Image (cartoon, grey):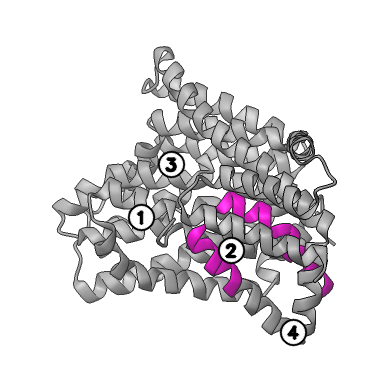
Amino acid sequence: MSIAIIGIIVLFTILFGLLLLKVPVSYSVGIATTLTLLLSLPSLPALTTVMQQMTTGMDSFALLAIPFFILAGDIMNRGGIANRLINFSKSLVGSLPGGLLYVNIISAMFFGAVSGSAAASASAIGGVLTKRMEKENYPKPFSAALNITSSTLGLIIPPSNVLIVFALASGGAASVESLFLAGYLPGFLLALAFLIYAAIIAVKNKYPKEPKVSFKQLSVDFSKAFLSILMIVVVVGGIIFGIFTATEGAVIAVLYALLLSLYYKELKFKDLKTVIIKSSKTVAVVMFLICTSMALSWLFAFNGIPQLISAFMLSSFESKVLMLLAINITLLIIGTFMDMTPAVLIFTPIFLPIVMQIGVDPVHFGIVMVLNLCIGLCTPPVGTLLFIGSGVSGVEVTKVVKPLLPLLAVMIMVLMLITYIPEITLFLPKVLGILK
């Protein structure tokens, strides 16, 4: 048995063993990487090598965008932006049967796109709408399930931190700009699928309508939400058209969110300390996770693990259709027990070379991978959004699972469409000349 195969067995045994013991993912990755080096490559100074690779992995200008986007999301969550987006969505679609279901989806799409955070969207939108939907006799488990799944829209529609992480993990094969553009149509397609499903459920169960608003009120609500929505145009547009980099765009997002929240008078200077401390804690967790995952990625490359897995899969699946199906199934399983960021960092270096060999564009694969792992955020046992959404709504996780299953089926259907119709993803980057 070769050293590389021994390394694979040791690495994944230690990693999954630690995860089963509920050791935090970042510690699990770091410990597994270090022990694998000690056991399979004793001639290398393991601790020194791991620390060097962690430091080298963090040495990226593009990576600076993540802390700033996290801070911008926390400022917006505290600054009253969610309420304005919900009110505009309510005026727009609330008068339809089951109007609050559409409000949840559209508000999550707007807020997720503005903040770039699915967790912030689930918390902010769910926190505002849960009591209102309960008063209108919407079933709480279904309301919670819809909030959980629709919150993933912000991870596909830019600006999205996880797309920046994929760009980093791809080693330059996919740029942030191209990924941002590629996320729009899949994100809107998923939102449309949720809206259609919500409409079917609303008509079937005769859910109530919101009072119809006048055009004047719609205009007022739009004007209040306009500056929030404009942030997407300013930040994402500037990045896509090369006016500034993703990192500079993230800084602009922070300044924009801060000025807007102060203008709305729902965020005071004395609140900034609390917001910054909260963001700093999140950033510390995310960055430590990224640097340990980068050390793990180096170990993969050093042992030739991507080449071994690539050779195995290419020999096992002759058809491109079956290959993509196998990768999707693998990622769906991984997503149930591993959070999105480490999954992207660990498995991108493994699967990206394989799909590129069979002619799949790395930008297309990035969107497929992110959407796939979004499903994992909604499923037990690790699903972050599942627990946030359940906590916000006050519904036990076990009661949310049943109404959640059809929504997960909707997400999988959209995933299959995006996987096998690459033009859905690549149309905008090609039209705007970022991809050829």
Decide which of tag 4 and tag 1 comes sooner along the chain: 1
What residue does disc 1 label?
A: 147
Residue at 41% x, 52% y: name it: 385
- Of the numbered discs 3 and 2, the one sitting upstream in the chain is 3
Where, quadrant-wise, is the N terminus in this rendering? bottom right
Q: Gap between marks 2 and 1, in whole Å?
A: 19 Å
**Mark 4 in CB contact with mark 1 (< 8 angstroms):** no
Instruction: Say which mark, if any, is on residue 394.
Output: none
Residue closest to the eye, 372 or 59: 59
Dot 3 or dot 1, earlier in sequence: 3
Q: Are marks 3 and 1 in contact (CB under 8 Å)?
A: no
Residue 206 image point, x, y percent: 19, 71
Q: Residues within 10 Å of mark 2 (few under 14, many from 20)?
A: many
Residue 110 picture location, percent across and down: 47, 47
Mark closer to the observer (4, 1): 4
147 on left or right of 241: left
What separation in Å lies between label 4 and label 3 (alpha carbons)? 41 Å
Q: Which residue is mark 3?
A: 120
Name the residue type under label 1.
Asn
In the image, residue 13 sits, relative to residue 417, either above or below, namely above
- Mark 2 residue type: Pro
Inspect this view and state whether residue 92 appears. no
Going from N to C along the chain, the mark reached first, 2 or 1, is: 1
- Badge number at residue 186: 2
- Choose top left, top right, bottom left or bottom right for residue 53: top right
- Viewer-side residue, 25 vs 228: 25
Report the residue marked by disc 4.
316
The Cα atoms of the two marked residues, 3 and 2, are separated by: 21 Å
- Which residue lies at the image location 63% right of the left edge and 79% below the top edge? 325
